[in-house]
Amino acid sequence: MCLTGVDYFSTLGYQPGIAALAAGALSPVATLLLVVLTLCGALPIYRRVAVESPHGQGSIAMLEKLAPQWWGKLFVLALLGFAATDFIITMTLSAADATAHILENPFVPGFLSGQRVLVTLVLLGLLGLVFLRGFGEAIGIAVLLVGVYLVLNAVVVGAALLHVLEASNVVVDWKRTLTFRYDSPLAMIGLSLLVMPKLALGMSGFETGVAVMPLVKGDLAGRIKGTKRLLTVAALIMSVFLIFSSFVTTVLIPEKEFEAGGKASGRALAYLAHGFLGDWFGTLYDISTIAILWFAGASAMAGLLNLVPRYLPRYGMAPDWTRAVRPLVLVFTAIAFAITMIFHADVEAQGGAYATGVLVLFMSANVAVTLAARRQGQRRLMYGFTAIGLVLAYTLVANIIERPDGVKIASFFILAIIATSLISRATRSTELRVTEVHLDPQAERIVRDACGEIHLIANEPHERDQNEYNDKRRETWLNHRLGSKDPIIFVEVTVPDASEFETELRVQGEDRYGHHILRIESSTVPNALAALLLYLRDRTGRVPHIYFHWAEGNPMVAMLRYLVFGGGDVPPLTREVLRQAEPHLERRPHVHVG
């Protein structure tokens, strides 16, 4: 729960101030609506995600299963763009808010005044250095930071509530402001609904809550039950703090202090801590807030380091170095530097982008659980999730219209991810791309009975009748003078899903019309044939031969067909895969084309 809370609870550092800027005197009302959306919307969604994805893969993995082939891959890449926006902005926004707490502290040297961007870059740089050296004992650190932070927040909010009780005029003034500005309670609720999307960053952390599922003790059922409890407890704790912190900051802090340059800008609760409990306690609160905000950035970095290697290398859409931690840390740190300088380390300016990333992930989770409920015939749940989805969709669209920065940043990430992914996929397409080769008993018998050299004839299956195989045998004799007495084996590859990158070959043997046939399903034809040839060489100790006929057509079109559909001009591509996989010419299987 504390690993989740590092991301979730740390938003208390800036959420009350952002809420006050967005909603003004209506901040407590808008926050209450946000809490209702959290408990009645986000929480049920992610409790269901925990059931459907108990190994911590989250809603993106659920949608990946529901949308196979290339459309599914492109959809996942788009979601990864929004997830990257969420995680990167978590790093930059948390570091910027930590900077606000540092610079507003009365004990900080004066020469740091006005150095907001520089201090934020230093914090991000330190975060990158920690991950370059390795990051361990995260759970213990998270428990300590979150425990201390929640206790200090409870003290600050409690002291503020006591002050409200002692100075009841502040509540009277707040009510007078509401009645003066708004005609009726319905008008207040309506306007609160309009500004609520700006507060959506107060719902972050649920995706992290699902990601930590593998750390929950117990069997699968126990893990699901524990994760549901984790999500529920975290949501309840945060809801209580959001309601009370929004109320006390709204009634006790002058509106002008929330604006840029004000003493409560990005640090509303810290402002109250210094004002009601003294600078020493306020400094302790600042240190705790800075630590958890910095660690929230660490949590986001860990999320990115977990997310990218899980998908892109598996899709063949990233170089192998992206499986390593340190190069990725350097890339993400550089991006965080750029985002910080673009937004001038402004907490409020980054809030919209952060909320967009959070809401898109919520929407993807909602779509995933709605489809899962429909597939399992749970109509009531499906209708309930659909209703929640409509509310989330409104919140997302309103946030995008009001503050399109999130979509701009996410679009940049999506375009960058798709462009680099497709380039990487193209450059890596002639790798072997086969992890293992397994033969069924019939295929084992065919290979075992092959005496002398093995001659394979590549056949693209159509009718699979006797005429097809006889015609292919005759064509091979005409093109290659492979006689009727030479033992031959037909090999046929079909492509059910060309979007997969690495596959495990399961070879099925078959005797048909007096011919031996090996049948394979793979994501690409040339790579599967090359892998089979290398396997047969290692299995028999003899270098096998394979026979093709030249294909007709434009070679560029054939290359595109290979990249997209797994076929294309098979003979030269098979030879190229073999050339890369086996550098020694005398051990390389022979490819004959005629």
Image (spheres, grey):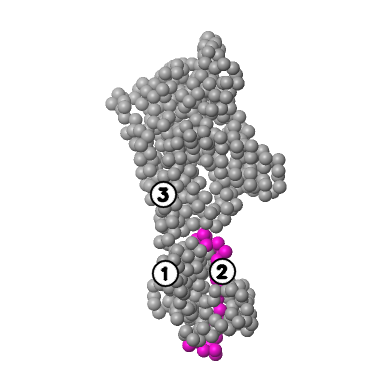
Q: Looking at the image, is mark 1 or mark 2 nearer the viewer?
A: 1
Q: Residues within 10 Å of mark 1 (few under 14, many from 20)?
A: few
Q: Residues within 10 Å of mark 3 (few under 14, many from 20)?
A: few
Query: Relative to 593, is 193 above or below?
Result: above
Q: Label 3 is placed on what type of residue?
A: Ala
Which residue is under mark 2? 494
Residue 492 in magenta stretch? yes
Percent coordinates x, y for residue 416 in the rendering: 41, 49
Q: Residue at x 45, y 81 (%)?
A: 594
Q: Looking at the image, is mark 3 or mark 1 nearer the viewer?
A: 1
Percent coordinates x, y for residue 313 in the rendering: 46, 56
Nearer to us in this view, 172 or 241 = 172
Query: Relative to 212, is 459 above or below?
Result: below
The Cα atoms of the two marked residues, 1 and 2, are separated by 21 Å
Q: Residue at x 37, y 33 (%)?
A: 345
The Cα atoms of the two marked residues, 3 and 1, are separated by 28 Å
Label drawn at residue 555: 1
Label drawn at residue 519: none
Nearer to us in this view, 16 or 72 = 72
Q: Residue at x 48, y 25 (%)?
A: 22
Percent coordinates x, y for residue 349 in the rendering: 41, 31
SS state under label 3: helix
Q: Label 2 is placed on what type of residue?
A: Thr
